[in-house]
Amino acid sequence: VSDGALRISKSTSGEAYVTLPVQFTNSDNFIIEWEVACNGTSQRTAFWLNTASSSTGLWCCYETGHFTGNSIGGSIPTTTTSLDVGDKIYLKQENGVISMLKNDETIFSKSISFSSSTYKFGYYTNNGRVQCVDNIKITRL
């Protein structure tokens, strides 16, 4: 914790994960929201939905002026935008559609069904990356 926010970083190479203690299913409808609490490094936020060790989930990050990522069935569109301290990120699953928003701006929306019966949400990092998140909320719709 740094200045009241969760600081996610790592000083050695290799992916590391912060997994939230909530479990989801494909039939759940929910919103996960968090706030950017520091500028960090070029990768200001990086998160996954499914399992940290699986490449068959949703992986998304903000890097140097744009969001990018991968999901089941291919990549998500690269979206150029800013990301500043105080911005809110929303990851919403509703009726099989997963959407990601920055404040009121839709970054992507895609129909996704994970093969695992249950899955989780978390953040990821690697050597030299720093991200700070605050006010994490999970709401059932």
Image (tube, rainbow, N blue to C red):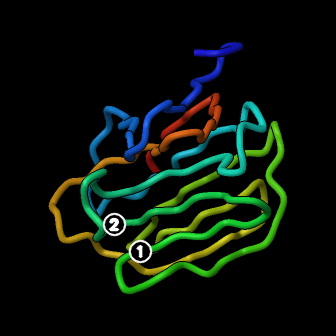
Q: In this view, does 135 lie above or below 27?
A: above
Quarter assignment of residue 116: bottom left
Quarter assignment of residue 117: bottom left
Mark carried by residue 28: none
Q: In this view, does 38 lie above or below 113?
A: above
Spot occupied by residue 140 in the image (x, y as percentages of width and height): 44, 46
| Residue 29 vs residue 73, the one in the foreground | 73
Please say if the residues under marks 2 and 1 sit with CB atoms less than 8 Å apart.
yes
What is the three-letter code of the residue carrying label 2? Gly
Q: Which residue is most to the front?
A: 12
Q: In which quarter of the image is the N terminus?
A: top right
Quarter assignment of residue 62: bottom right
| Mark found first going from the N terminus, 2 or 1 | 2
Q: Which residue is drawn at 20% across and 54% down?
A: 118
Q: Which residue is drawn at 65% across and 50% down?
A: 43
Q: Which residue lies under the disc numbered 2?
A: 57
Q: Which residue lies under the disc numbered 1?
A: 71
| Mark 1 surroundings: few (<14), some (14-19) or many (≥20) residues within 10 A | some
| Residue 43 vs residue 1, the one in the foreground | 43
| Mark 2 surroundings: few (<14), some (14-19) or many (≥20) residues within 10 A | many
Spot occupied by residue 137 in the image (x, y as percentages of width and height): 54, 35
Spot occupied by residue 90 in the image (x, y as percentages of width and height): 62, 53
Q: Is residue 124 above or below residue 75?
A: above
Q: In this view, does 134 lie above or below 2?
A: below
Query: Is 84 situated left or right of 45 in this image?
Result: right
Q: Which residue is drawn at 59% across and 41% down?
A: 129
